[in-house]
Amino acid sequence: MNDIARLSLSAPWRWMRAGWDDFRASWPASLFYGLVFAGMGKALSQVFADAYEYVWALTSGFLLVGPFLALGLYDLSRRRERGQALGLRATLMAWHPNRASLGIFSLVLGVLLLLWSRASLVVIAVSFPDQLPSLGAFLEEATASPEHLQFLAVYCLVGGFFASLVFGISVVAVPMMLDRDTDGIVAALTSVRSCLENPRVMAWWACLITICTAVGFMTSHLGLVVLMPIIGHATWHAYREVVLPPP
């Protein structure tokens, strides 16, 4: 059983500063991952314009695949920690040594995404049994009708449950599987314990990730090019500080 450190509320700021230092040290490779995140964000925004009823499910998918897409960023931080070269090519295969555990873990998160997608569509179908309104009409009705405000509350509650579940089992799980070659169950349980023993710190960390993601989207996705790599590097430092090394 891995020991979990008790953290102060200032810990996420340390992780972000360390993530910024890693980004500056490995910016050519880190920017590649940032551009991929920005491309995903652009695609998500296009879907929102054409079919907004799927946006929250796809946003969940965006956040869900983030830890796996950031594997290369974790590897860059680990390489910098070890004094190794910080090139892009080696990080593209960072998943290979523990591919079985990472594959099973990604399958579990994929099932959660499918459950959330189904739940979100069910909530929408129940709330709008006749016909889904256009985006403009929906936004207008949502602010004018108490029934639609209730729909938004239920929708956010269901989405918040799935988001919290995914965050709880994955916040340090993927970097741990990369670093220690552990299986998905041990990594997920360690991640949950990290949240249970540091609830305020992890809640603040989740808020910072959400804020950075929102800023990235509001800057026409340009912010994602830099902010997502910083968060990826910072997540590595979160894992290193939260999960104590074995004796």
Image (cartoon, helix red, strand yellow):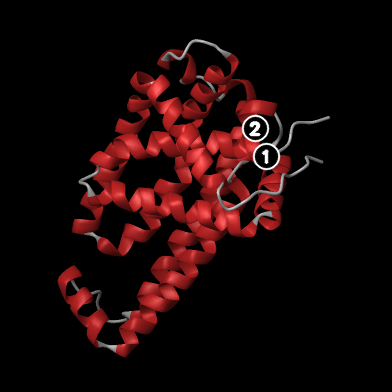
Could you tell me if the residues under marks 1 and 2 are in contact, i.e. CB atoms within 8 Å?
Answer: yes
Q: In which quadrant of the rendered image does the C terminus lie?
A: top right
Q: CA distance from mark 1 to mark 2?
A: 7 Å
Q: Amino acid at mark 2?
A: Met
Measuring from the top left, give residue 162's x and y in whole percent. 52, 61
Mark 1 lies on a secondary structure that is helix
Q: Which residue is mark 1?
A: 184
Residue located at (64% from left, 38% from top): 241
Q: Quadrant of the N terminus?
A: top right
Q: Residue at x 48, y 19 (%)?
A: 91
Work out which residue is located at the far top of the displayed protein and give it: 85
The type of residue carrying mark 1 is Gly
Q: Can residue 234 be seen at all in this image of the molecule?
A: yes
Q: Is residue 68 visible?
A: no
What secondary structure is marked by label 2? helix
Left or right of 46 on screen, residue 70:
right
Front-most of 51 and 165? Answer: 165
The image shows residue 160 at horizontal and vertical percentages of 49, 65
Badge 1 or badge 2: first in the primary sequence = 2
Instruction: Determine whether 139 is above or below 89 in the image.
Output: below
Residue drawn at the location 27% of the way across and 88% of the way down: 145
Q: Nearer the viewer, residue 44 or 118?
A: 44
Task: Please indicate whether residue 133 sits to the left or right of residue 114 in the image.
Answer: left
Above or below — where is 88 with respect to 162? above
Q: Nearer the viewer, mark 1 or mark 2?
A: 2
Q: Residue at x 19, y 69 (%)?
A: 135
The residue identified by callout 2 is 177
Percent across and percent down for residue 118 are 45, 63
Residue nearer the viewer, 142 or 214 = 214
